Image (cartoon, rainbow, N blue to C red):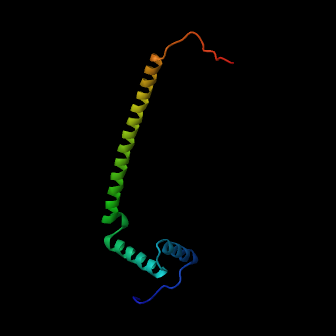
Amino acid sequence: MGTERVDALSDELEAWVADRAAAADLTREEFLRRLIDAHRLLDERGEPGESAAVGELETEVRDVERRVAAVEDELDEKISDVRQRVIQVKREADAKRPRSTTTRSSNAG
């Protein structure tokens, strides 16, 4: 059994293998070898959710999500500060603008 080979896959699987191999710039055989090796490693380490690599990635993703949320909060705060400053500058400019009761007329000539 250790020397038996599977040469035929369903058309759907064959298309998937071909697409993935091309995307990875690998031959069909190289892609299948890597796929089987990766599956073997996962099998040896337990379920994918239990593997150390997946756990590390999940931790990194949570860390990145926290950092993104912090950046978004900081950005929202800065945008609010800029809005308030723009309103303040507009009010100051409006207060300094001379108020005229006469309207300007253009000289046509």
Residue that protrudes farthest toward the right in the picture: 109
**In-image side of 19 versus 44 (left or right):** right
Disc tally is: 0
Residue shown at 34% from the left, 60% from the top: 57
**In-image side of 12 versus 51 (left or right):** right
Quarter of the image for the N terminus: give it. Answer: bottom left
Q: Nearer the viewer, residue 48 or 15?
A: 15
In the picture shown, does residue 57 fall above or below 17?
Answer: above
Q: Quadrant of residue 38?
A: bottom left
Residue that protrudes farthest toward the top in the picture: 101
Residue shown at 37% from the left, 47% from the top: 68
Residue shown at 48% from the left, 80% from the top: 27
Q: Indicate the position of residue 22 as horizontal and vertical percent values.
A: 51, 74
Q: Indicate the position of residue 64 as horizontal and vertical percent values.
A: 35, 52
Q: Quadrant of residue 11?
A: bottom right
Quarter of the image for the C terminus: give it. Answer: top right
In the picture shown, does residue 21 fall above or below 51?
Answer: below
Q: Indicate the position of residue 3 as horizontal and vertical percent values.
A: 41, 90
Residue shown at 36% from the left, 63% from the top: 49
Q: Nearer the viewer, residue 39 or 108?
A: 108
Q: Nearer the viewer, residue 63 or 43?
A: 63
Q: Indicate the position of residue 80 as horizontal and vertical percent values.
A: 41, 32
Q: Nearer the viewer, residue 25 or 68?
A: 25
**In-image side of 63 versus 100 (left or right):** left
